Image (spheres, grey):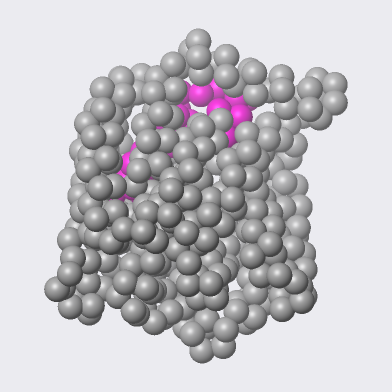
Amino acid sequence: SVVMKTSQAPLFRRDFTLVVLGQIISLFGNAILRFALPLYLLRQTESPALFGAVGAAAFIPAVLCAPIGGVVADRVNKRNIMVVLDFSTAGLILLFTLLLDRAPLVPLMVASLMLLYGIAGAYQPSVQASIPLLARPEQLTSANAVINMVQTLSALLGPVIGGVLFGAFGIRPILWVGMVCFFLSAVMELFIRIPHSPRAAAGGVLSTVRQDLGESWRFVRREKPVFLSVMLVLALFNLVLYAALVVGIPVAVVQVLGMSDSRLGLTQGAMGLGGLFGGLLTACLGPRLRLRRGSAVLLAASLTAAGMGAVLLPGVPPALGWWGVTAMSFAVMVLSTLLVVVLSAAVQGQTPPDLLGKVMAFIMAVSNCAAPVGQAVYGALFERCPAWAVLLGAAGAAALAAVYSRRVFQELDGGR
């Protein structure tokens, strides 16, 4: 198949397979926690504004830690980074479990989610930077599709299983499952061999980070200024569409439609299924996918938000509304996965290997910086305005950003 073999050397060799398996386990633990912890907060407080504000605060460390993770990924053995961060996450969850019911909920939730998201932000650049070292150049699109499918498979199973466990047993079993997942993933990653060429540090840690980030900034500004335009497009979509869905889907399903925790798990599981389908589609189409069509994909994604808003209009039966929100959740993930995989392969193919971790982290950090602002704003909007109106407004703003993105994607596609 295209995924299994794109050249004489198979993609699924020992070390790439171990990376994939480690990702499956750790990302499942991540997905089940990201589903359950915010839902627990929303159920306990019944406040969309607090839900959005806590989500925004949790997202900030992910943005700040991603560039540092990229610097470290280019200078430290990537396997060691994955191992240390997975063990650290397991320890953090254990501490949260011990403090639950013994400490004030909101400060504990904010601190724990900030640490979890910060660790995840520092972790992902190592995974992204390891792909070109474990796959041949012509296999990059398929390798990225595999990693993306792993992420979305975890996003599919995590909320579905998390919804059942949360509805039946509460938060504690989910915490123990997540802790075991991160511990097992760290043990498995001990056996991965990723090629590494040590680079001398330029003085202390802070000076090394400053120099390396400056190096990535100079590369983007001088050699690939189109990357800056791509970051702006992604930031706009994170601000107006991604943030609306992150806050809006739980609020719509739990509060507007009055559905159960397991129904919310199925809806968010549908997002994972959509990402899995999008990854399979990307792996099968491979080089035939062109970035110049990226604006059409973003425009279609904005229409899914409009569809969600439409099924939440007054008079629509709750059951029909839930099916509509779930179907649109599936569709938006198919579209976003198609774009993210092809975009990642394009950036990897146009960036020198010694800068790849930093540049990928730089793009992730800048494009994600708008998400916390969006989550806080949408939390307040969903508390004060009808959900259908907020989602229709988000769809209109996203459509305008999609129109702007057409020239950007054509330019990036021309540089491949």
The residue most toward the top is: 222
Q: Residue at x 69, y 42 (%)?
A: 78
- The reply, left or right, for residue 278 in relation to residue 21 is left
299 magenta-colored: no
Q: Is residue 172 above or below residue 197?
A: below
Q: Which residues are magenta?
A: 335-361
The spot of residue 295 in percent (x, y) is: 24, 34
Q: Is residue 293 visible?
A: yes
Residue at position x 58%, y 40% in the image:
63
Residue at the right extreme, as displayed? 204
Q: Residue furthest front?
A: 384
Where 409 falls versus 296 (above or below)?
above
Q: Main secondary structure of the magenta part?
A: helix
- From the viewer's perspective, tell me whether residue 190 is left or right of residue 9: right
Q: In which image quadrant can residue 103 be found?
A: bottom right
For the image, the number of numbered tags is 0
Outermost residue on the bottom side: it is 168
Name the quarter where the C terminus is drawn: top left
Given residues 16 and 375, the one toward you in this image is: 375
Camera-side residue: 195 or 160? 160
> In the displayed structure, does residue 310 sit left or right of residue 32?
left
Q: Position of residue 366 (x, y in %)?
A: 51, 32
Residue in the image at 36% along x and 63% along y: 249
Q: Is residue 309 above or below residue 409?
A: below
- Residue 391: image location, x then y, percent: 27, 54
Q: Residue at x 43, y 54 (%)?
A: 380
- Evaluate whether residue 197 shows in this view: no
In the rendered image, residue 354 lying in the magenta stretch gets the answer yes
Question: Which quadrant holds residue 182?
Answer: bottom right
Q: Where in the figure is residue 201, as x and y percent of width and height? A: 81, 24
